[in-house]
Structures are given as structure tokens and as C-alpha cells.
Amino acid sequence: MRRHFAARIKAARALYPERPYRDLLAEVLDYRQWRTFAFTLHRAGGGTEALTRSRHSQLSGGEQSVSLHLPLFAAANALFGSARPDAPRLLGLDEAFAGVDDTGRGELMALAKQFDLDLFMTGYDLWATHPAVSGAAHYDLSHSATEHAVSSLLLVWDGSVNVADFDGTLARALGSPETRRAPAAARTGVAASLLLDVADQ
């Protein structure tokens, strides 16, 4: 990778010797120029139209989110298809599936499974407990303003039920180094408060 980008930077400097080095770097490393994707919106009735920025802004919040996630998954699948068979197929999503209802989330997760993508997601009230998902590790974070701390609870979805990890057994089974565990005395209070949070949901 280093040789590849070094060669591209060298070629750009030879082509534009008068341009500032910073501008050349910004252009060479601008990943948006590496690939071009054109999106088409397919309606239930059979009609199609180009999905431009202006058309996208007219969609509902859920439609906007789905219309971005679908091509993202397809593009990731296409790019990962050119990698080695043992290469990771990991896709990170921040605020994943925001604005998408539970049915839509399940369909998107089913699509991710169909493409054999491993999703690393963050979001509010985000659960991977859908029949299409055969397994997921979920960390539920709870912020305490009075204690100025954030506690976490591992829940593991096995395809049919969520199992809470109150004693660290699941974390150890998943290979956690357990380097950030609280002392046993402090952990008892944290587990109790998290249990209430999970039960309330």
C-alpha cells in the first residue's frame, strides 16, 4: 500500500510541479475519486428514477437511510469480492440504521448476512435481535452522571435469545483479555443497575 501511494504521489508531483505538496496529497488521497457509483431509485410500482441529491432530500427519513445503506452494502460486497478469500469483510456504521423502522432494520441486516458482511455498529436503541442474524455481541452502555462513569453490559444474541453476561463468562468465551474489569465489590452494584435497565427495556 505504501509503494502504491508513493508512486501516485510521485506521478502527481511530476505532472504538477508547481502545485503545493499539501494540495497534491489531498487530491491523491481523496478516496471519493477512486470509484464512481450511480444510484437508481426503484419504486414498488415498477418505476425508476435517478437518485440525485435533490431527489434524496425529498424522501422520508427512513427512505433516506435505506437508500444509502443498500448501495453501501452492495459497494462493500463488490470491493470485498476483489480481496483475498480470508480477508475480513468488516463494515463499520456509526448511528447505524437511524430513522429506519424495526422491519427495515431486519431487512438490512438480512442483506448484510446475504453479502457475508460483518457489521460493527454504534447507535441509540440499536439491537441485532432479528431472525436473519445468527449471532451478535452487543454492548449496552449506561452513563451515570452522578458517578461520572460509563458501565457496560455484554449481551450475546444466539439467533433466538439474548443472553446477558453478568459474571464475565461470555466475555471470556469470546476471547476478552479482561484488562478493564472492575473489582468484584464494585461490580455487584453495576450489575444490579444494569439489570434494571435491561428489564425496563
Image: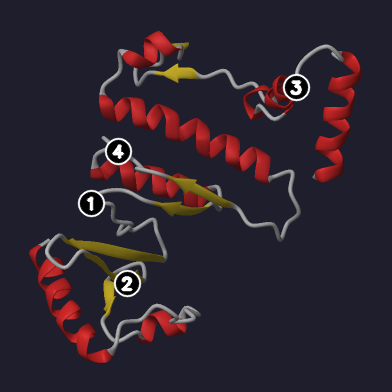
Residue 179, image x, y percentages: 45, 80
* Viewer-closest of 19 and 57: 19
> Are the residues flagged by discs 4 and 2 in contact, CB closer than 8 Å?
no
In whole angstroms, how far apart are the C-alphas of marks 3 and 4? 36 Å
| Cα gap from disc 2 to disc 1, whole angstroms | 15 Å
Tag of residue 125: 1
- Sequence-wise, the earlier of marks 3 and 4 is 3
Task: Tell me the amino acid under the disc marked 2.
Answer: Leu
Between the residue at mark 3 and the residue at mark 2, the CA separation in whole angstroms equals 45 Å
Picture coordinates of residue 24 (x, y %)?
Answer: 75, 22
Separation of residues labelled 3 and 1 (CA atoms): 42 Å
What label sits on residue 25 in the rendered view? none
The circle drawn on residue 154 is 2
Determine whether 35 is above or below 125 in the image. Answer: above
In front: label 3 or label 2: 3
Q: Which residue is mark 3?
A: 24
Answer few, some or many: residues within 10 Å of disc 1's Cα (few below 14, many 20 plus, some between 14 and 19): few
**Circle 4 sits on which residue?**
98
